[in-house]
Amino acid sequence: MKKNRPRFLPDRRTFLKGFSLVLGSTALGFPFFSFGSCQSGGNSDSGTENQADPQTQGNTKKLGIALVGLGGYSEHQLGPALKETQHCYLAGIVTGTPSKIDRWKAEYNIPDKNIYNYQNFDQIANNPDIDVVYIVLPNGLHAEYTIRAAKAKKHVICEKPMATSVEDAVRMLEACRQNNVQLSIGYRLHFEPYNKRVMELGQKQLFGKVQSIEARNGFNITRSNPNVWRLDKKLAGGGPLMDMGIYCVQGACYTLGKAPVAVTARFGEVTHKDYFDEVEQSISWKMEFDDGTIADCSTSYAEGQSLLAGKAEKGWWRVEPAYAYSGKSGETSKGKMDYPDVFEQALQMDAQALSFKNNQKTIVPGEMGLRDVRILMAIYESARNNGKRVPISYA
Ligand code: NAD
């Protein structure tokens, strides 16, 4: 299913080089920009303004993270990333597949008392080793496990998309609020230099006012078994829009530092009916912003794409691939963008752990996840109604 996506397992030097470059640059005031707050309902994007500086923060205890769901993303990205993090470590696992336990136990030195299944998961409440629960399950299960984790009084990181409905996303936020824990989304690209540069170019208007945005993301799922949760409406919430198109929604929002006021959308043609009887094969949409800027976006489960581009009054930029785990490449009207590959999941979880420790909202809070679910649902509503313009309310 994810064979065509790069699986980046950097050597330690590459990672540390990237890590120190990003962290080291904090001291120089670059490139940690302040892009306006996403705290007020998450309707705008921020760069890194709440990112605590590990050099100056005194609490050195590493937070214990439990991964819920040991599928591809946990196995190939999050687990390896947690070998590199400085402020959190893999303390526990939650799995429904007993045959996976021995390997994870051995590789990550996890004691038996920190291993759970989906039935006894709630007992994690009594485990002081676990500070954070990271939900890495099919999208349709995010709400249930986030709410159970919140009731266990654990901070939650939830993978994208946060939920498969606005109602679920609201319930998740409410559960975390009531239990006085934080909810953060696995939006790794906020911790990655190419996408951070796009935020800076767009939000600081370094080439003048942004005039248009183009964002495309997809991969070909039709080379794999059709019997996967990504093609199951109940578990996935939808097709490529939920899985890949969400990166385009994010890209457009963080280019401008704000959320769209309306969307229009059209489903693409279904050419693989055996795969796409429940979810869309492709969808294209436009996001309209209050200043008139339009983001032209598309996503597909039948074609590989990975683009985030922008045109402004006095220049342009183009990152392609923009959303892959590694090997990003980009250019602006002033020349090639040249940033190191970083282990973005490690940077993401370290920043989230620091925010949890310091009792500060992360730069990718649950409110931002809810905002994005509202946008995704509006895109579907427009596509179901032949491209009708759907205004979006964030209240
Ligand atoms: P996957 O299919 O590889 O793994 C899913 C895991 O969930 C498996 O371990 C499976 O056993 C478990 N599971 C539990 N209940 C299940 C059920 N009822 N049906 C199917 N599986 C069930 O998926 P993945 O690629 O690891 O994706 C998991 C989550 O992570 C998704 O929400 C996805 O959007 C997200 N993800 C994020 C990124 C990113 O870059 N941020 C990348 C990949 C996946």
Image (tube, rainbow, N blue to C red):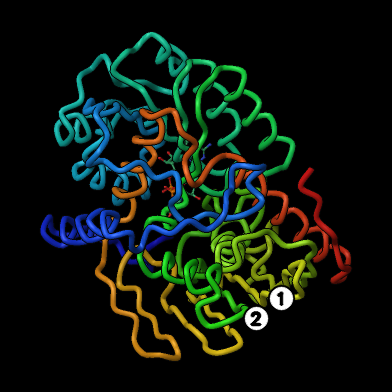
Asked if residue 240 can be seen in this view, the reply is: no
- In this view, the residue in front, 242 or 257, is 257
Q: Is residue 104 left or right of residue 212?
A: left
**How far across and how far down the image is residue 246, in percent?**
58, 59
SS type, badge 2: strand
Residue, disc 1 = 293
| SS class, disc 1 | loop
Residue assigned mark 2: 212
Image check: 131 left or right of 108?
A: right
Q: Are marks 2 and 1 in contact (CB under 8 Å)?
A: yes
Q: Left or right: 2 with respect to 20?
A: right
| Residue 311 on image: x %, y % | 58, 85
Looking at the picture, which amino acid does disc 2 mark? Ser
**Residue that appears at 65% across and 42% down:** 40
Kind of residue at badge 1: Thr
Instruction: Please state the horizontal and vertical placement of residue 236, each as a whole percent of the image.
Output: 60, 48
